[in-house]
Image (spheres, grey):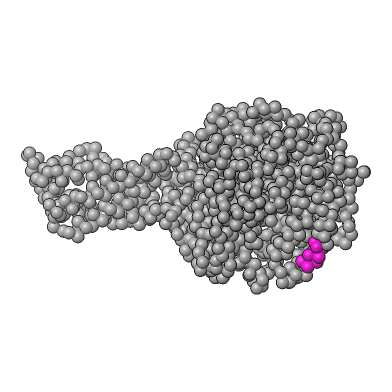
Amino acid sequence: MGRFYNSSIGKKFFVSITGLFLMMFLLVHLALNSLLMFDDSGELFNHAAHWMGTNPIMKVMEPVLGLGFVLHIIYALIVQIVNWTKRPVRYAKMDQKEASTWTSRNMIYLGAFVLIFLGIHLVNFFAVVKFGTPPPITIDGVEMHDSYTLVSGLFKTCVSIDVLYVLGSIFLGLHLKHGVWSSFQSIGLSNTIWRKRLEMVGSIYAIIIAVGFSIIPLYFLIF
Amino acid sequence: MAVLNSKVPEGPVHLKWSNYKENQNLVNPANKRKLDIIVVGTGLIGASAAASFAEMGFKVKAFCYQDSPRRAHSIAAQGGINAAKNYPNDGDSIYRLFYDTVKGGDYRARESNVYRLAEVSNEIIDQAVANGVPFARDYGGYLANRSFGGALVSRTFYARGQTGQQLLLGAYSGLNRQIALGNVTMYNRSEMMDLVIVDGRARGIVTRDMLTGKIESHFAHAVVLGTGGYGNVFFLSTNAMGSNGSAVWKAYKKGAFFADPAFVQIHPTCIPVHGDAQSKLTLMSESLRNDGRIWVPNKLEDAAAIREGKLKPTQIDEKDRDYYLERRYPAFGNLVPRDVASRAAKERCDAGFGVGTGQAVYLDFKASIERLGQHVIEDRYGNLFLMYEKIVDENPYKTPMMIYPAIHYTMGGTWVDYELQSTIPGLFVGGEANFSDHGANRLGASALMQGLADGYFVLPYTIQSYLADQITIARMNPADTPEFKKAEDEVNTYINKLMNVKGTESVDSLHKRLGKIMWEHVGMARNKEGLEKAITLIKELRKEFWEKVRIPGKAESLNVELEKANRVADFLELGELMARDGLLRKESCGGHFREEYQTEEGEALRRDDEFMFVGAWEYTGPDSEPILHKEELKYEAIEVKVRNYKK
Amino acid sequence: MSEKSINIKVKVWRQSDAKDKGRFETYDVSNVSTGSSFLEMMDAMNEDLVNSGKEPVAFDHDCREGICGMCSMYINGRAHGPDTLIPTCQLHMRKFTDGQTITVEPWRSKGFPVIKDLIVDRTAFDKILHAGGFISINTGNAPDANAIPVNKVDSDLAMDAAACIGCGACVATCKNSSALLFVSAKVSHLALLPQGKIEAARRAKAMVAVMDDLGFGSCSNTGACEMECPKGISLSNIARLNREYLVANVVD
């Protein structure tokens, strides 16, 4: 298997596998976050967040998720850095608009933007919960973090954060629009028929993620 | 005549090849490693021969002028490959394939060679399938066939319209395997500049590395030329731009007789010439005649209106169309052999019924599309239709294709005996480069068959028989062998001479002028005056070439103009020999049509009493005339008849 | 078929040899028929150059009927120029307009170093095929051609993949100079046929290893190769190669 890790196909395999794993996570994340909009008291969301924070499975999954991110980024970077060396003399004129989509050619930049956004996002919430002092709340006798207030507070007060989150969601969506089908292709699970289906699924998924995550800050900003 | 010994084995025609194989000499495996074979050209014959020799244990050096052996012009063959498998159960047999090929060649091919070709045809299909050639199949998983010109059975195997490509890639994959195993050393972008003869035997070649201009010598115990035909003597042909006759021509000048140079095939279905800038002609596969109907308007005024753009072909009523092949040849209709179809098209155009520029006829698929549906036609010829549309900018599903005959294949070539050995011992020539199997006209789908027959199944036997008594010859080092040194010096002198003309006219311009002379006087219809005139004109042009040719750049680097000049210099000599051969042959047969010799109906008039021979020319020097040697053709297994495709 | 005559400028890459840095030169070409092929226009340009005592622009070409795969030009930012399903030799001047400047460059890739002007070295493709682009059978070993029936669907897919002409447009157009379309086409062609299936795993591993060594990048699935491929070789071949390669590595 040693050759596999180092081969061009093998490296792409890891980018894709980790990407598919992260896509699963995004769905869970979105499902959980959408609870923010269904209960203005915040009780529903706080319960869910508490359960996520204390459930033993989730305890195990948290570092796995982190590892998924790290591997995805590292492998994507390795692949990209190698690819950058493959055309030492550039073309004077390149016209790819008919041959491929902009998103497919710029995954690394979309990914980089998403990474920056991820950093800010982690500082905004994850770091506060883990290392800072999140506001406490007691629901039904159980003491937990008031995650709802943390989120709603940020989104209600700071327009620039809202804009950033909407932009982040859109870039993430663009990254996923190519990423979904591409991941299946790279692990060999595609053919002429399934390509159309997977591209369709990818587009729908990307829209759900981009719109879903954009709605939440806008919801708090507007209502 | 004693000079030409065709070495045809004894026995009835169907046992000759078996007899040969049973009695031939063999080389033991340990000795095979000590024997080198040079193969020049990597088309079907070159690639298949090189791979097969290497599999047997010989050490092979293979050469091609392209950047990869995969690009040899066999790749452009479209329609298919014949074999006597009789899978369709329509009455085919080895004898019938043999018969059709001899008849198609107008009884000017050597009977024993053609029979052997038909005999091994089936093995070629087996070999190709095993190599991964994706021939067309039916839903049951078994191979499909289609029909081709000059035959009443469906015996043609095909891979869409890319049969040549697939067969070549099959042979090339075998070659790749042997290159990887170290049994073949491949020299890409190398041009053979001369043949080296030591003690009367072919012992190597001198090449020019086309990237660096370096002149190099290579030794071998035997040399095989599979360098294709010389159709580019006409400038415009369906050959690749780089296809040339130089290897066989250099061999001719070293003593390998050149047979029947006048036998040139004009293919009836090519895309017509569009203007003076035209650089080559594109073939539309003969297979299209299976489903396409050829016609011109039957009223002169309609033809004129079409030429002026006032009428469209789709506006001509059925009753105003002349399906002239169906009219003249009811039995074979649109599937008459190529020479017949070409002449018929020329006859109609000369009579004023031509369309397009006047030098074109229609190939119409309307009836087939109505009968079978567009998807069936698309499945069969999709890539050809696309190619036509890209070139002509018209949709052939909607409006009929325009076609016109063009130079396609040369039946003539180096004279070889039954073993495919030339008059120089140790020099073997296969495929289009030799003369042997197609007589005066080649049937469709037979070139691929011959190339692979020679490479896979004939040469591996016959060359071994030759090499069996060469095992005592040690490998020679060209650097210490005076014959190699001399050949290299001659090549260098020749290149310097070319470079130092420093004239005013480009190679292409001179080549186009040669092409015009050839097409006009040595083309589809020839006569005594024209051929004599051609000889004079070519001589003059050759003189002009050596005074006027302009080659910019250096010889010691990649120099495209020098490459072309070297080839055209040879064409300027070869063209003359073609005219000479045409002049000699006072008859019409196959692709060679002498206007003086035709029937009252305008059909070819063959003169078996005087001309049933292979005319092999011997080179005697730059300033003296070549000598003709005749190999009389005897037909024992076949009755010689007048070709008749009417009934 | 209304043909016109146009005047154009050709901005073309000139490089005397592999060591030369290279530069663009611009030449006027006048009275070009729109019915001419692009290479016929290049011929006319070269004829002018030769007549003025200059070296003509060297470019690879041979069959000029779209099958040998020798022609290889990057024209106005696109491999084989502004048309689809054709190599350069089938590109016609009707795709250009009067007065236009046409930029012509060689294939650019680490795997395809420039030899001279527009000619590049594509022997890397041959080397990849040496590694396993064949079925290991000697001449004379073959059983009857109909002894092993082949599913028509597989046979047709194999033919689709085998249509590759090895021109290198996939590499030239790929942002990573990936050769995966070329490699996958050959792997697919042979793996789809029962004759080639036997050594499919070994073949996939060997060919990918050589491909990686020879300077080609990895696949980003942009699909540009498929769009610029003169023979329309499908990306599904790449998926098949990825699958074959994965399985080959898992199995042994």
Q: Which residues are magenta?
A: B537-545
Q: Looking at the image, which residue is at 86% across and 41% down?
A: B608
The chief SS type of the magenta part is helix
Q: In the rendered image of this protein, does residue A56 appear above or below residue B303?
A: above
Q: Looking at the image, which residue is at 72% across and 29% down?
A: B93
Q: Looking at the image, which residue is at 78% across and 65% down?
A: B541
The answer to which of C35 and A221 lies nearer the viewer is C35
| Residue C103 horizontal/vertical position (percent) | 51, 65
| Residue B29 horizontal/vertical position (percent) | 75, 37
Is residue C101 highlighted in magenta? no
- Could you tell me if residue A16 is visible in this image? yes
As drawn, the residue found furthest toward the bottom would be C52
On the rendered image, what quadrant is the C terminus of chain B found in? top right
Label total for image? 0
A162 left or right of C62? left
Q: In the rendered image of this protein, does residue B97 appear above or below residue C118?
A: above
| Residue B482 horizontal/vertical position (percent) | 83, 58
